[in-house]
Amino acid sequence: MKPIRIKEQYEVTDDPATGHERILGSTYEEDILSDRGSINTLGKVTHYALHCGCYDEIGGRCYECGAISCVKCHGRCAVCSCPICQAHSIFVPSEGGRQLKLCRQCYDKTVRRRRIVGVTRFLLSPFIRFERRHENRT
């Protein structure tokens, strides 16, 4: 049985780390003429793991490393909204027990600001009485 038609299709993206194309998935179909005269289609669909290790649909590309993550692993910085992968996400606890996902630059700015506020409060504490945000005023 000789094939009548062969159809191959690849889903690719450019990998910024290596500069080469990275195959995300492929489809292969082959139409053959059977001995009984019918046309049979045989096919194969292959999906490759994303950088995060998942096989789900693509969520986005990290702006720092260019890694392609799935929808569950991909996210955005809570401050600047840059797309980031799990590996470059830094989780910071916030009010209400939630975890904020931050990129490295926003995390550094937040830590720097918290340190400046802490030092300023410490230096001014002999002269000014500061109220805590979480204390109830009565």
Image (tube, rainbow, N blue to C red):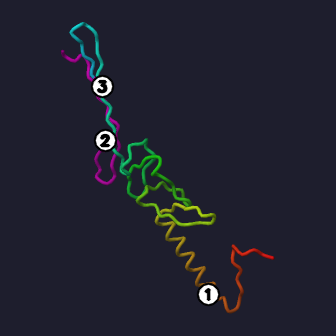
User: Picture coordinates of residue 138 (x, y %)?
Assistant: 81, 76
Chain-order first, disc 3 or disc 1: 3
Q: Dot 2, crowdedness within 10 Å: few (<14), some or many (≥20)?
A: some
User: What secondary structure is the stretch in magenta mostly built from?
Assistant: strand
Q: What amino acid is labelled 1 in the image?
A: Phe
Which numbered disc, 3 or 1, marks the residue closer to the eye? 3
The answer to if 10 sits in the magenta stretch is yes
Labelled disc at residue 122: 1
User: Picture coordinates of residue 66 (x, y %)?
Assistant: 38, 53
Q: What amino acid is labelled 2 in the image?
A: Ile
Q: Secondary structure at mark 1?
A: helix
Q: What amino acid is labelled 3 in the image?
A: Gly
Which numbered disc, 2 or 3, marks the residue closer to the eye? 3
- Residue 121 versus residue 36 in the image, above or below: below
User: Picture coordinates of residue 121 (x, y %)?
Assistant: 63, 84
The N terminus lies in quadrant: top left
Which residue is denoted by mark 3 in the rendering? Answer: 43
Q: Secondary structure at mark 3?
A: strand
Chain-order first, disc 2 or disc 1: 2
Q: Are marks 3 and 1 in contact (CB under 8 Å)?
A: no
Which residue is denoted by mark 2 in the rendering? Answer: 23
Tell me which corner region of the image, top left, top right, bottom left or bottom right, holds residue 98: bottom right
Chain-order first, disc 2 or disc 3: 2
The residue sitting at 62% across, 66% down in the picture is 95
Pick whichever, 42 or 118, lies toward us. 42
Distance from the alpha carbon under mark 3 to that under mark 1: 70 Å
Residue at far left of view: 1
The residue sitting at 57% across, 76% down in the picture is 114
User: Picture coordinates of residue 122 (x, y %)?
Assistant: 61, 87
Left/right placement of residue 11 relative to residue 133 reads left
- What's the magenta region? 1-29
Q: Secondary structure at mark 2?
A: strand
